[in-house]
């Protein structure tokens, strides 16, 4: 299968869907923290999940893969994870240690950016483990939100949600360790651009 062409275009259907996802982040937070309209908040998450899938499909099938889209997609995923753990922690649905642990991993990874930029890279390639972790977490938090209650359905959602959350958190940190290993290999094998130019 040939490599997809990556363009510098901005106005594409996948990018518009990514912008739509980003607009849903503050709406989601307001819904669960303001009026506590959990049903509408879950709908926002469902629409976000659908647009996440759709923008990737459209980008590949219509040859609309762009550098902006490659940046927006993981940013939107991280913002939804951050917004969801913050909202759920403030509602006392998840403990604060979990709400801190997930953004902490991403904060630690930001310290790798200078070393990447010096070698001409904006980011490391996303691998399957990282996608699996994000998948688990993006399923865990809606289920935990749905599990906020005393019915049998709430209990079932809470149990399944915590299973996804535990696996997702473990995979998230495992993926982070792999990113650090990739960075170490890159630092050892690729010279900084300014050094190679000199």
Image (cartoon, rainbow, N blue to C red):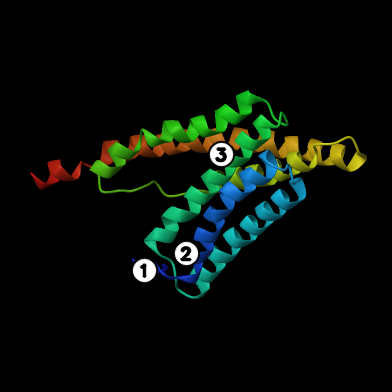
- Residue extending furthest toward the bottom: 62
The image position of residue 104, as x and y in percent, is 50, 30
> Does 110 sit left or right of 135 as displayed?
left
Residue at the spot 30% in from the left edge and 48% down from the top edge? 121
Inter-mark Cα distance, 3 to 1: 28 Å
Residue at the spot 23% in from the left edge and 42% down from the top edge? 118
Label 3, secondary structure: give it. Answer: helix
Q: Is residue 128 above or below residue 188?
A: below
C-beta proximity under 8 Å, tags 1 and 2: yes
For residue 78, which numbered disc appears in the image?
A: none
- Mark with earlier residue (3, 1): 1
- Mark with earlier residue (1, 2): 1
C-beta proximity under 8 Å, tags 3 and 1: no
- Residue extending furthest toward the left: 198
Residue placed under numbered mark 3 in the picture: 82
Q: How crowded is mark 2: few (under 14 residues within 10 Å), some or many (20 or more)?
A: many
For residue 15, which numbered disc appears in the image?
A: 2
- Mark with earlier residue (2, 3): 2
Inter-mark Cα distance, 2 to 3: 21 Å
> Does 162 sit left or right of 83 as displayed?
right
Residue at the spot 36% in from the left edge and 68% down from the top edge? 9
The image position of residue 79, as x and y in percent, is 53, 44
Residues 191 and 41: in front is 41
Inter-mark Cα distance, 1 to 2: 9 Å
- Residue extending furthest toward the right: 152
Residue at the spot 61% in from the left edge and 50% down from the top edge? 27
> Does 67 sit left or right of 154 as displayed?
left
The image position of residue 20, as x and y in percent, is 54, 60
Residue 173 occupies which quadrant of the picture? top right
Residue placed under numbered mark 1 in the picture: 9
């Amino acid at each position: 299968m040939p490599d997809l062409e990556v363009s510098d275009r901005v106005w594409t259907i996948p990018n518009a869907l990514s912008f739509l996802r980003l607009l849903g982040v503050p709406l989601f937070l307001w819904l669960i923290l303001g009026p506590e309209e959990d049903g509408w908040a879950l709908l926002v998450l469902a629409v976000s999940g659908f647009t996440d899938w759709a923008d990737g499909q459209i980008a590949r099938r219509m040859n609309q893969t762009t550098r902006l889209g490659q940046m927006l997609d993981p940013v939107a995923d991280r913002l939804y994870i951050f917004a969801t753990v913050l909202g759920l922690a403030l509602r006392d649905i998840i403990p604060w240690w979990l709400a801190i642990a997930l953004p902490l991993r991403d904060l630690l990874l930001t310290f790798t950016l200078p070393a990447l930029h010096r070698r001409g890279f904006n980011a490391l390639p996303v691998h399957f483990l990282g996608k699996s972790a994000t998948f688990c977490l993006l399923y865990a938090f809606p289920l935990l939100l749905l599990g906020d209650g005393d019915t049998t359905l709430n209990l079932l959602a809470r149990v399944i949600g915590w299973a996804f959350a535990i696996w997702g958190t473990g995979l998230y940190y495992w993926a982070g360790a792999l990113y650090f290993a990739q960075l170490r290999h890159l630092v050892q094998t690729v010279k900084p651009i300014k050094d190679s130019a000199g």
